[in-house]
Amino acid sequence: MHRRMLLALAPMKDVTDLAFLKTLKDLNSLPDYFITEYFRTVAHHKKMSPYILRSIDENPTGRPIYGQLVGHEPEYLARDALALMEHDCAGVDLNMGCPAPMVCRRNAGGGMLRSLKAMDAALGALRDVLPAGAFTVKCRLGYENPDEFERILPVIAAHTPDRVCIHARTVVANGNIVDAATADAWVRLARPAGLMIGRAALRNPWIFSQLHDRFQGRVPASPTFRDVLHYIRRLHERTLEMQERYVEEKHIHRMKKYLVYTARGLPYSFDHYMKRAKTSRDFMRICEDILD
């Protein structure tokens, strides 16, 4: 039996949104906490994404949620952190891991790791304005190579964030936690305080309940194709609720964003036909024909 292991849903743009949070609740498979998709912090103050804010303001799960910021200018990070804390937010997470070239070119996300001085200033600004328990950091091992982490970690530690997530997918066992066995491997090798799961949760939303069972000495349940169909139906309903004005094409496009991950491990025909569906009716018919 393992010691208590925190489980978190990794933030993923466009898919770990309020609809997905609600679906996890519907399936009774919840992590211990959530982190939102990232809010961009820029000098010119603009309204924070109302769509992402809904994940905080309408969070139905009863589990804490942290708002994630991506940016590099200390004063504006502090400004937006204070704005997030005006919502029902457990805290603020600083993204120092995003590898997207567009983000890194602006010295944000993983790009912050190129300058220890700039990183130090950003971390200090957030620690100054956030209360104890409300400041977390997501960080890669380095910008060019993992050896950089020996210089990065002391800078992070100096500002005593309340939790640090190390994004090390390209260094240790691909870092993908996809089932109980890979979770066990992480625990044995790294002895972390917790595990953060992204893509695998979209493919298998029961992974949180499975890991809770595994860590408490119970045999995890194995979902069937019909369970996957039930998941897709619930997600279809939850994404529909998110649209103030229904646009069928927009609805199906968003469903496909989730299901490109779910398709892994399913028959090839599912991925092939699902991606080509044009209407909601055709989309669900394809899911039912293959999974029921």
Image (cartoon, rainbow, N blue to C red):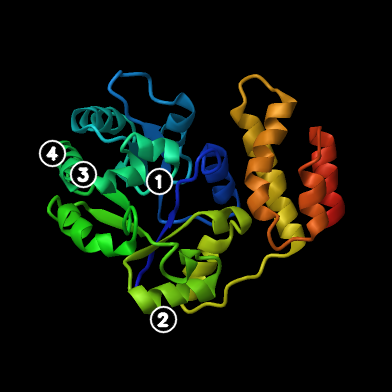
SS at mark 3 in the image: helix
Q: Are circles 2 and 4 on residues that touch, CB within 8 Å? A: no
Mark nearer the N terminus (2 vs 3):
2
For the point 46% across and 76% down, the residue is 184
Residue bearing the label numbered 2: 1
SS at mark 2 in the image: loop
Q: On residue 119, which mark appears? A: 3
Crowd class of label 2 (few under 14; some 14 to 19; many from 20; radius 10 Å): few
Q: Nearer the viewer, residue 287 or 230?
A: 287
Which numbered disc, 1 or 2, marks the residue closer to the eye?
1
Mark 2–mark 3 Cα distance, whole angstroms, equals 39 Å
Mark nearer the N terminus (1 vs 2):
2
- Against 51, is 225 above or below? below
Residue bearing the label numbered 4: 128
Q: On residue 98, which mark appears? A: 1
Q: Position of residue 179 (x, y in %)?
A: 55, 69
For the point 38% across and 79% down, the residue is 188
Crowd class of label 3 (few under 14; some 14 to 19; many from 20; radius 10 Å): many
